[in-house]
Image: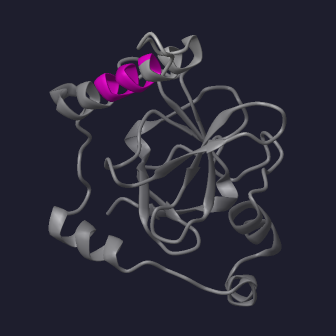
Amino acid sequence: MEANGNMPATLQKHYAFMVLGTFLAAALILCPSCKQKQAVSPEQRKTEMTEKIIKSDEEWKKILTPEQYRVTRQKGTEAPFSGQYDNFKEKGTFKCVCCGYELFNSDDKFDSGCGWPSFSKPIANDSVKELMDNSHLTTRTEVICPRCGAHLGHVFDDGPKPMRLRYCINSASLKFEKKK
């Protein structure tokens, strides 16, 4: 604080963003239309989430293909339009290729034309974890598996209404379970 009791301009800006961020987070949490459907019971999800998966690089290399390892464990990206799920239309659930955690429902998949599978939302609020990604001279939001930390892709704010989100996910980070 300055001697006259006023905050410097840079602190005022940070404070304003903090207040705005808190307000937006509260609005999203309380908004009934923002609630996302649960594919499994809350009790089952709680049990699955408490079982964090931690493996060494050598253990991951034994169970993943080289491409899956590069994408999920080394934060790689597959070439656009090359992944098996980009143009995929079957009904079911997309899971983490590393640990099997449920991530996305095929009902929320759409063709964004970007070359990677795109989803409008995760299967449940806790299905993915979002992190700030400042790599490649830009700021993006990285999407990872909350259970094993696998890199899945990124989320962008240019998706369909009402959420306007596009979860752009590498096929190599997914495995598909057909709807029964």
Query: As drawn, is 94 to the left or to the right of 74?
Result: left
- The front one of 164 and 171 is 164
| Position of residue 161 measured from the top left corner of the image (x, y, whole percent) | 40, 17
Residue 95, magenta (yes or no) = no
| Position of residue 167 measured from the top left corner of the image (x, y, whole percent) | 54, 38
Which residue occupies 35% across, 19% down? 162
- The front one of 162 and 141 is 141
Which residue occupies 36% across, 59% down? 179
Decide if residue 41 is in sight here: no
Residue 4 occupies quadrant: top left
| Position of residue 140 measured from the top left corner of the image (x, y, whole percent) | 66, 34
Query: As drawn, is 97 to the left or to the right of 34?
Result: right
Residue 23, magenta (yes or no) = yes
| Position of residue 105 measured from the top left corner of the image (x, y, whole percent) | 39, 48
- The front one of 71 and 30 is 30
- Start and end of the magenta stretch? 16-24
Query: As drawn, is 8 to the left or to the right of 101?
Result: right
The residue sitting at the front extreme is 3
Which residue occupies 32% across, 47% down? 125
Q: State the quadrant of the C terminus.
A: bottom left
Decide if residue 82 is in sight here: yes
Query: As drawn, is 150 to the left or to the right of 6?
Result: right
Residue 134 occupies quadrant: top right
Q: Main secondary structure of the magenta part?
A: helix
